[in-house]
Image (cartoon, rainbow, N blue to C red):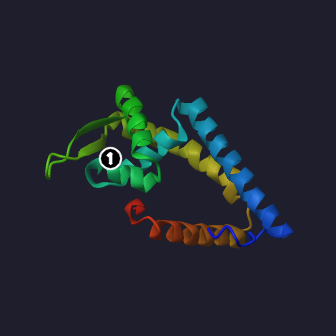
Amino acid sequence: MDKSREPRWLEGAQQHSWRALVIGTTLLMDRLDDDLRRGFNISLTEYEILVRLSERPERSIRMAQLADALAHSRSRVTHTIDRMEKAGYVVRGSTPEDGRGIVATMTDKGLELLAEAAPLHVEGVRSYLVDVADPADFAAVGRVMDAVSDQLIAGHPEMEIR
């Protein structure tokens, strides 16, 4: 950033929207996480990992790809997978292609947990966000966040979200 240039400060309405996005996102994620912890003793991140694994062939994915797909650090995903492996929801192994990478695979117990937790999570997403927003506004939020993601990923190609 050019320190000799004056910052382009946000105007009143922009500042309001920015703060609403920050607090709304924080409160929403905290509530969804709390619901899953109270209902199933898993975090929102653990739930997202189960979802990602369920969508993959053989319910498996390389750990590095999983971290990229979640936009989390590899160390954070490793710690989360450690907890999930101890609980019996995933197992880790080496990649069949070259044996160098580590693959996380969802167990049947993990799939059962996902099937039980999904209705609570989806109901939370609906009641806390989807049903509160006008459909056109909700679609606009999706378009805006897609544009933000695309721009930020373009600056860091290693973060390609799948």
Q: Amino acid at mark 1?
A: Met
Answer yes or no: is residue 54 visible: no
Which picture quadrant has residue 17? Answer: bottom right
Which secondary structure, mark 1? helix
Towards the viewer: 50 or 62: 62
Residue at 29% from the left image edge and 42% from the top image edge = 105
Q: Spot the residue most to the front.
A: 4
Residue 78 is situated, as x and y percent measured from the top left of the image, at: 38, 38
Residue 162 is situated, as x and y percent measured from the top left of the image, at: 39, 62
Residue at 62% from the left image edge and 48% from the top image edge = 123
In the rendered view, would you say 18 is above or below 70?
Answer: below
Residue 27 is situated, as x and y percent measured from the top left of the image, at: 70, 46
Towards the viewer: 117 or 48: 48
Answer yes or no: is residue 47 visible: yes
Q: Which residue is mark 1?
A: 63
Q: Spot the residue most to the right.
A: 12
Q: Is residue 48 left or right of residue 32?
A: left
Residue at 59% from the left image edge and 66% from the top image edge = 145
Q: Is residue 121 left or right of residue 114?
A: right
Towards the viewer: 84 or 71: 71
Q: Is residue 38 left or right of residue 93?
A: right
Residue at 41% from the left image edge and 42% from the top image edge = 77
